[in-house]
Image (cartoon, helix red, strand yellow):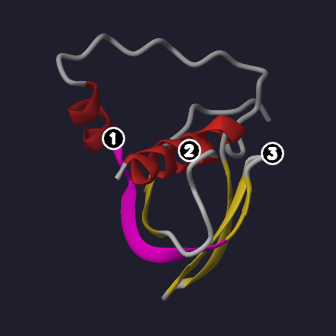
Amino acid sequence: MKLSSMIVAAIAATCVLAGQGLAQSPAKPQPSASPAKAAAETMKGQHSMDGEVTKVDAKKGWVDVKTPEGRMKLHFPPAALASVKKGDRVTVEIGMTPGPATAK
């Protein structure tokens, strides 16, 4: 399940960062008693898929996953893929949170 957790974190980070401009700094959120609870409260949508690793390039940090919903190529720090191999069964969880407003 360690790989699943890394996949969740990487996808969530990708979704949050995608499309954001660097022109503005987002306001710092107030500390929360439970970061996981705070993240769950701001989620716009969540989806979970079981799949199979079809290709791994651990040196470059890429892993290909085949799920019933389709295929995806995911990127991780290379060290995170050291123990991942073709044929591994994984669960991919995707969550989207709203990003800060960008300058137009």
**Which residue is situated farthest in the left direction here?**
33
State the image quarter where residue 57 is shown. Answer: bottom right
Residue 56 x, y percent position in the rendering = 71, 62
Between 9 and 54, the one lying in front of the other is 54
Q: Find the distance from the CA under tag 3 to the CA under tag 1.
A: 34 Å
Q: Find the distance from the CA under tag 2 to the CA under tag 1.
A: 17 Å
Residue holding disc 3: 59
User: What amino acid is found at the position of numbered circle 3 in the picture?
Assistant: Lys
User: What amino acid is found at the position of numbered circle 2 in the picture?
Assistant: Ala
Q: Are marks 2 and 1 in contact (CB under 8 Å)?
A: no
Residue 8 x, y percent position in the rendering = 45, 50
Residue at the location (65% across, 71% down)?
Answer: 72
| SS assignment at label 2 | helix
Position of residue 9 relative to residue 28, above or below, is below
The quadrant of the picture occupied by the C terminus is: top right
Q: Find the distance from the CA under tag 2 to the CA under tag 3.
A: 17 Å
- Determine which of the numbered discs, if any, sits on residue 10 in the image: 2
Other-residue count near label 1 (Cα within 10 Å), few / some / many at <14 / 14–19 / ≥20:
few
Magenta residue check for 47: yes
In the rendered structure, which segment of residues is drawn in magenta? 42-54
User: Magenta region's main secondary structure?
Assistant: strand
Between 63 and 42, the one lying in front of the other is 63
Residue 97 in view here: no
